[in-house]
Amino acid sequence: MKSHNRNLTVLCTIISGVAICGSGATGDKKAPRADAASDTSPPQVAYAGCVRIFNGRDFDGWVADPSTWSITNGAMRGVAGTSRLAYTKTDYGSFRLIFTARMNPVNNDHLGVLFWGDRPTDPSKPKIDNAGWIQFMPPFAGMWDYHPPQHRNLPHETIAKGSNDSTRWCVTEILCNLEKGTMRAAVDGVELARYTHPTPGERQDPEKRIIAGPIGMFRHGGGASEYKDIYVEADPEEDRLITLKTPAAAPQGSRKESAGGSDLRWTKRTLFVGPYENCTTADLNKDGRLDIVYGPYWFAGPDFVPRAYRPNHLSPAYHHNNSDHVMDVDQDGWPDIIAGGWDTNGIYWYKNPGSQAAERSRGWEMHNAWEAHQLSATRGRMEMFVLHDYDGDGVPELHAVCYGREEPLEVFRFSKDAVGQPVLKPFILGVEGGGHGVALGDVNGDGREDVLCEIGWYERPAGDPFANPWKLHRETDLSKMHPSCPFVVKDLNRDGRLDIIFGRAHDYGLYWWEQLAPKSDGTTQWKQHVIDESWSQAHCLALADLDGDGQEELIAGKCIWAHNAGDPGAADPPGVHYYHWDKTALKFTRHTIAAPGEGIALGRQISVVDLNRDGRPDLLLPSKHSFWVLFNEGPK
């Protein structure tokens, strides 16, 4: 397992060395005992919402075999013996875990934390191999998979390089969501790794499943692993790492902050001038850095110099391509590109050539066009496509959004043709409602994810989502508004009911619909609220925590020339904004990302991702005007 050098220091708020946690916390009221002079560990800190689950005195709440595990200077220490794991008596599915750890001494081994595996039955020899565990290894951010039939290295997204000095105390935070199958991990205040399990909904198949289980601290090899200051938050509400370093504080009085959140600084860079309105990101060349896909080009990070990978054959005019997505279609280990167009040309996948040119000593082929393969023909007037895993089998489906609301609502499923080549086969989710706009969320609170479209919302049935067409409910008919594509849903007022946020994609206005209590027959009821009616063509919306306060902001911008020059306000200069939600006043406050006159617009697909690995989400904004990357520099 490869490791990397990097010296990092966590920035924390120290509160007299006392563990202070959220509701239900149980911690020592005395300051922890100082370690030996060689111990330079960070002091205990407060982690909001977390409970201290290791008291530093005994193994209350833990299973730890004495042949291996003891307590030294407030840390559980694993060395020698027969047990490779000290694990919690409580099971955890979705959780936030924060702990401090080191190797003392190190002997060609490493630290590790295990989760989502089977509960051991023998503490003296806890089963790890073939028990379904996922392991994260600080501080170098390696990952390992213990699913049968053979444990193996676990591919994951590298956000930043970790350190190979495991003898120094380091603070690790792991944020896991069992339902989504996601993990994020930070060490010493820097996010290092992200992982998404390929079959997040599987709970039975031992080769694919993830389950709620104990959290285990790992002892590996001939050295000694030490863990202390262990905190957990069960079922965290926010997808946010709380130990990340914050930007350097501005001088007193210089930070501009409105009642509706922080104003942010952005470094803006033009990447390309072209007509394409879609983009996405992935590590296409497997160098550990994110690359960008935009129309017929890909941009290799971190310099983002454009390279052509296909001709522009998807659509000759108006709407040159309607979506860019990345997926390993042929499962050869290299991420491929999926793209579609407005016309009936269909949906294509482009085979990533990987390192074939270099392996064949034919370097001149490295810039050849990627092989194009049609996945399916389409109806035409295709507004966009969305990759989404409807059935939880780890393979996403492709949701098609057709401009004509009278057209069927189709979800394409990946399959193989007669000769074994990848193809898409349509499933008619609804006989109408292709329409303009799509969002996904549990509208009626039955625990199943529904589909919202222009003419209403389709209720997901129990069981197999592809057994029969879904039931249409027309209470959320937005056809007169021509909603954003996509629009978004979120429980804004925290009443347990999903609300709808949308713009008029081809007119003025940005709104949210509050979901009220349902009628006695279960029919949903809604109330409209205005967010902003000062600009037009909010064609694409996104939610993301831009300012690091743990709450998502609404991102929206003008889609310049959305219907060429035919929409109201089409001649107005474009701008891009984010809106901070005030949970008390129940209203949005607008902040400017790119002001009218800067020439920056937002087309039909936005990408929000940390491109430069500084812990802050950046923005990729494609439009018919030009393609920009905006680096988030934090609060003003």
Image (cartoon, rainbow, N blue to C red):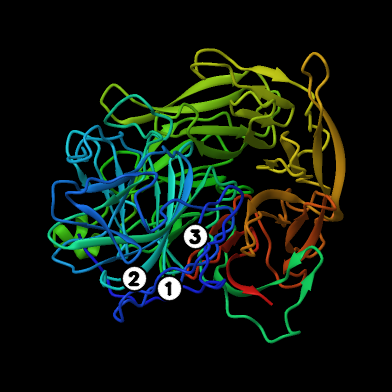
Residues at circles 3 and 1 in contact by the CB criterion of under 8 Å: no
| Observer able to see residue 488 | yes
- To which residue does mark 1 refer? 42
Q: Mark 1, residues whose alpha carbon is within 10 Å: few (<14), some, or many (≥20)?
A: some
> Which quadrant is the C terminus positioned in?
bottom right
Which of the 4 image quadrants contains residue 495?
top right
| Observer able to see residue 160 | no
Pick whichever of labels 1 and 2 is earlier in the sequence: 1
Q: Dot 2 lies on which element?
A: loop
- Report the amino acid beneath label 3: Asp
Pick whichever of labels 3 and 1 is earlier in the sequence: 3
Mark pair 2, 3: CA separation = 21 Å
Q: Residue furthest bottom?
A: 251
- To which residue does mark 2 refer? 169
Which of the 4 image quadrants contains residue 105?
bottom left
Question: Residue 332, how many percent across, how many down?
Answer: 25, 43
- To which residue does mark 3 refer? 28
Mark pair 1, 2: CA separation = 8 Å
- Report the amino acid beneath label 1: Pro
Mark pair 3, 1: CA separation = 17 Å
Residue depth check, mark 2 versus mark 3: number of the one nearer the observer: 3
Residues at circles 1 and 2 in contact by the CB criterion of under 8 Å: yes
374 to the left or right of 279: left
Q: Of residues 430 and 550, which is closer to you in this image?
A: 550
Q: Of residues 292 and 204, which is closer to you in this image?
A: 204
Question: Residue 1, how many percent across, how many down?
Answer: 20, 59
